[in-house]
Amino acid sequence: MTGDRTTFPTDDTFVSTGVIDSGAQPDRGRHAAVPGEPLLTVSDLRVQFTRGGRRINAVNGLSYEMVPGKMMAIIGESGSGKSVSSRALMGLLPGTAKISGSIRFDGRELIGLDEKELRKLRGGDIAMVFQDPARSLNPTMKIGSQITEAVRAHSDLDKKGAHARAVELLRLVRLPAPERRFHEYPHQLSGGMRQRVMIAIALAGEPRLLIADEATTALDVTTQAQIMELLVELRERLGMAVIMISHDLGLAASYAEDVVVMYAGQAVEHAPVRTLFSNVRMPYTRALLGAIPALDREPHSMLPVTPGQPPDLSALPKGCPFRPRCSNATDKCLEHPPFLEHEPDHWWACWNPAGTELDTAPEITAALTPASATEAAHHSEHDRPEDEGVAR
Amino acid sequence: MTTATLPRVPGNRGPRVSPLRRVTGSPALRLVVKRLLMAIPIMLGVTVLTFWVLSLIPGNAAQQLLGAEATPEDIALLEERLGLNESGVSRYLSWLGNAVTGDLGNSLVSGQPVSDVLGERLPVTGELVFLAFFVSLILAVPVALIAAHKPNGVLDRVSMMVSTLGLSVANYVLALLLVLVFAVTLGWLPAIGYVPLSEGLWANLEPMILPSAAIGLPLFCFYARFLRGDLVDQMQQEEYVTTARAKGIGSWQVLLRHAFRNSSFGLITVVGLNLGALIGGTVIVEQIFALPGVGQMLLQAINTRDFVVVQAAVVIFALVAVLANLFVDLMYAVLDPRIRYGSS
Amino acid sequence: MAVADTPLQVAEQPAADQDDAVPGGRRWHGKLGIWLPGGAIALIVAACFLGPALFGLPRPVGGSVLESYLPAGSPGHLLGTDPNGNDILSRLLHGGRASLFIAFTVNVIGLVLGGTLGAVSGYVGGVVDTVIMRILDVLIAFPSLVLTLAVAQALGPSIRNTIFALAFFSIPAVARVARSAVLRLRGQPFMAAAELSGTSAWRMLFKHLAPNIAPQLITFGMLGMGIVIIIEGALSFLGLGIPAPAPSWGNMVADGQLSLSATPMLVVWPSLALLVTVLSFNLLGENLRSRWSGR
């Protein structure tokens, strides 16, 4: 399922010897969901913001479901709604956002929950790791108290118990010398270590679903691989489901089992990772795949480019949002394509999917250049690249 | 920049260690020393500037003291006795030499040593400023927290409207309106006067209430607005606030433990900057309420062209401003771990 | 060095997304928030400069003692007269003329000189920047009101002296605002692009920097109008601003103070004029800022 994983360096250089592996926790009862039953069902989720008098449709009828214990990737450009939709899941959007549709978690509807219920959920059943660990930790608080705060929000542990639990969590995320680090401040840690602390905070409430929102984007490639390996390992050990949100299709292919591709605030293709790569249907997904530089590509050849602009979320075109940029577009595309399970486990929203008679040669198929893909990543809302290994 | 991934081994701090760093161990101490060193040229600049501006002013103290009837001989004699006929540079240098030892000269009018006069006057101004600060901060923090808890809520809008209004009132206008309402109309508080602390706490505080309110109310509005704005910014724009909310802790806890902790740095800066400006503003309030403070002394000295006293008062005011900024840096060094543990 | 680089008006930070609560509310509120105080200022300016001639008001000085202390609503004296028998409304409007003229001149001088100084300092950087900033540190640490008082007393109160003194001490604050704005801009790609394409330094300053820092300086100027009006009032209040018997809001308050319990309206009218004018400038400045920063 994650065959490509071994191509990444798996050495975790931060692992210190002699760390007692106290983190292994067998099924704790509440993790025993029925296999096959969806843990999370998102249907027709819509999120709208009003900025300066303009209505911005950040999420437009997003639907997907995921089963417990899976690792699923949500892929899209910045502005595709992947981050906003995941924040909607936790009720973390500002009060000015209009949210409609349905989010069912373990059979319970999350939309419309009151603040008290949401608070129990946040950091409890669902936890989140954010993009930029330099900005996501409070610079004026010791990392220890930032973790114990999360621990105590979801348990009855006293101060001493919470301390012990926090150190245990730091050990679980393989932070070297956890007892000492407990008393340090975020700026004294490297980027990778800070992200480990963020993961420790997320694990404090023993979540059943962990959302990693571009959790490795701000890190260098080596650290990125270490953090991803850690997430994979923790998922297996703790039996939680993980949603990784990324603009990096390659990263998703290496670690996820399922991939949801988002465009203009909706899911356009959803399939197990193998199926998606061997049998891509949605022209947009294919454009993304074409933008990944491959070794077998002719040297010095230009990477394919998708014409047009990313969609304007305040003025979406009629019908399929990708129509203006799609080489497969026909008049039919003026009608909105439904997101359906066309083949077993393979969902897409397209009237003229790739692999049908209308499909033209791959070279005509549009694709994003890696340059514009990275640029998109750098323009994403919270992006602040930082040099790894150097504390500020 | 320090490489934090490496364990910190004492004595092994890498090749580039500045001499200053070697002398002073902690980064916080280094900062304070650096700021202290920076304060010296600023104070020198202030004293030079005052001396220069005062020397530009036509007409001198001797003329003023002796009146229009004085003969030029009398004036020259007095000038020599007061040392006014020397060059500006040498007068400045001798003044500076004395000032460093605490001798700020004698008043041209009364002949009293200025440092003695200041000793009587400073406590009055100090009490006034302290009360104004104390009351404004005590009120501003909870108001800002309540306003920021629900931005654009009723409480937020009302408190911000009131504070905008309060910021637009000149302190002399406010002082008179307070007198009009609380002293003239209601007769609750005395309109003017000062009673030393030795005659009882309440006797001392009672006439101080209106003057400190006249200074403190606009200050309260300013702090409340500033803190509220900064808190809302933190709550809406900072990722660590999202992290805190994602932990599932309550909204008040997020506001108090996370946003306020960070906003307090901004507030400290503003308070420090304010203190300097505020001291100058006490002049007019002391005049209205007939408080025998430094401000009133200064105004009298200006009217009698007692430039020795003016010079001393200006230096004191500037010194307080510089010290206030230094105090802010100290607070940063104590409170902000990024400085306490050293990083750029 | 948090303190050294903190611009004086630390409060002037954009408040984020204030009006998102009401859909479309920002526009409505934003426009009203600018037009209302803007209109009030226009009205005050028109009343002060055109009003006395338009309504044929009596002269603000040289009234007859026989007409002193007339109550509001007396024939020919809408707001009544003061102890010298001068028409209060006329004195208010003439006093406003002086306040507005002084505040405007001071701010123009302060913005041009301070803005240039700050922009050059931030743009050139290095030793020049250090020297300029240290000099400004001295000026900021300086109790400017005090020195203004001393100068005014020595040179004799006059409008010109007041303007010079106030303008001089408004320079450091403006310079700091301009400098921090320039420093922020310097990091922007378009600046690097212009620099790489061989644009000259002066052209950079005036073509690229000036238009970008102008909004911030103009907003600061609006807030500065309020500050200068208040300080000018303080000087006049202490008898060191506009020389009596010419009216100013400050010296009207001071004169009224003498008979505060008997005729409080003598203090209330000029106080109200000060309050409304300063409030309008403050509101205009604030709302302009949140509008510009909201983009």
Image (tube, coloured by chain):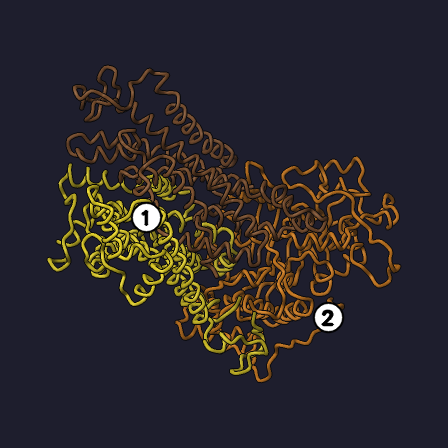
* Residue situated furthest front in the rendering: B73
Mark 1 belongs to which amino acid?
Val
Position of residue A279 in the picture relative to residue A26 (left or right): right
Mark 2 belongs to which amino acid?
Phe
Q: Nearer the viewer, residue A221 or A31?
A: A221
Q: Nearer the viewer, mark 2 or mark 1?
A: 1
Q: Is residue A234 above or below residue A217?
A: below
Q: Are marks 2 and 1 in contact (CB under 8 Å)?
A: no
Q: Nearer the viewer, residue C35 or A242?
A: C35
Callout 2 environment at 10 Å: few (<14), some (14 to 19), or many (20+)? some
Q: Nearer the viewer, residue B227 or A23?
A: B227
Position of residue C227 in the picture relative to residue B184 (left or right): right
Position of residue B322 in the picture relative to residue A363 (left or right): left
Q: Which residue is mark 2?
A: A8
* Residue situated furthest bottom in the rendering: A18
- Rendered hue of chain C is brown
Which quadrant of the structure image shows residue A248? bottom right
Split into 4 quadrants, where in the image is the C terminus of chain A? bottom right
User: In the rendering, at what x and y percent does residue B200 appear?
Assistant: 12, 58
- Rendered hue of chain A is orange
**Colour yellow, chain:** B
Residue at the (79%, 53%) spot, across then down: A280
Callout 1 environment at 10 Å: few (<14), some (14 to 19), or many (20+)? many
Pinpoint the chain carrying mark 1. Answer: C
Position of residue C2 in the picture relative to residue A83 (left or right): left
User: In the rendering, at what x and y percent does residue C57 appear?
Assistant: 31, 18
Which quadrant of the structure image shows residue B316? bottom left
